[in-house]
Image: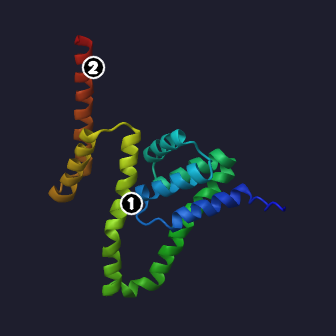
Amino acid sequence: MLKEPKMPILLQMFLTFFKIGMFTLGGGYAMVPLIQREIVEKRGWVEESEFFELLALAQSSPGPIAVNSSIFVGYKVAGVTGSIVATLGTTLPSFFIILLIAAWLVGFRSNPHVEAFFKGIRPAVVAMIAAPLFSLSRAMGIGWKGLTLVAAVAMLVAFAGFSPAILIGITAICSLLYGIWQKRRQQGA
């Protein structure tokens, strides 16, 4: 019985992140389930606990979450070269798609079929973003109170026109005050 030759790790990384970049609509958090499935479950490049740390780091770093994730995973697996290869894999599909759109789709933007397509995929993109947020909240121990707060803030931004920056600031201040209150309450008990 012949064994199939194993694909070089850099080619594996490029193809894996190319697939992530190619088949994920919505970007950002919509990519999280596919990234997790590919790098944790299928390839085993990162442990699940390490994956959540990687996500936190990718979120807090400037730039898109998928690109930051590919940089971190690429570096962990194959150093600087791995980072470059994984990043190229993630970004090239978007580059080619934008190039195609710029070349051909500009003339079709008022086409009712094209408009219907983009309106039709909106709910799927929202679901693809909501699913990993729910999973992350469970993994981080955020309960229904926290999820209710997130939903309320999202509603204020979406429907009441509040600035996300102001709401983030208010939420940060309220969280800090709540933490101080909790600490004092525990010390007094």
Residue 84 position, x and y percent, is 63, 56
Query: Quadrant location of residue 120?
Result: bottom left
Give the residue type at disc 1: Met
Q: Earlier in the sequence, mark 2 or mark 1?
A: 1
Cα distance between the residues tagged 2 and 1? 37 Å
Image quadrant in which the N terminus is located: bottom right
Residue where numbered disc 1 is placed: 128
- For this orientation, the residue located farthest to the right is 1
- Asked which quadrant contains residue 5, the reply is bottom right
Residue 64 seen anywhere in this rendered image of the structure:
no
State the colouring used for the structure image: rainbow
**Residue at the left extreme of this rendering:** 160
Residue 83 % position (x, y): 62, 52
In this view, 39 is above or below 23: above
Q: Secondary structure at mark 1?
A: helix
Instruction: Residue at 22%, 40% (x, y): give it.
Output: 170
Whether 33 is drawn above or below 55: the answer is below
Q: Residue furthest top?
A: 188
Most extreme residue toward the front, as rendered? 1
* Residue wearing tag 2: 183
Asked whether, in this view, residue 188 is left or right of residue 44, the answer is left
Question: Image check: 37 left or right of 134?
Answer: right
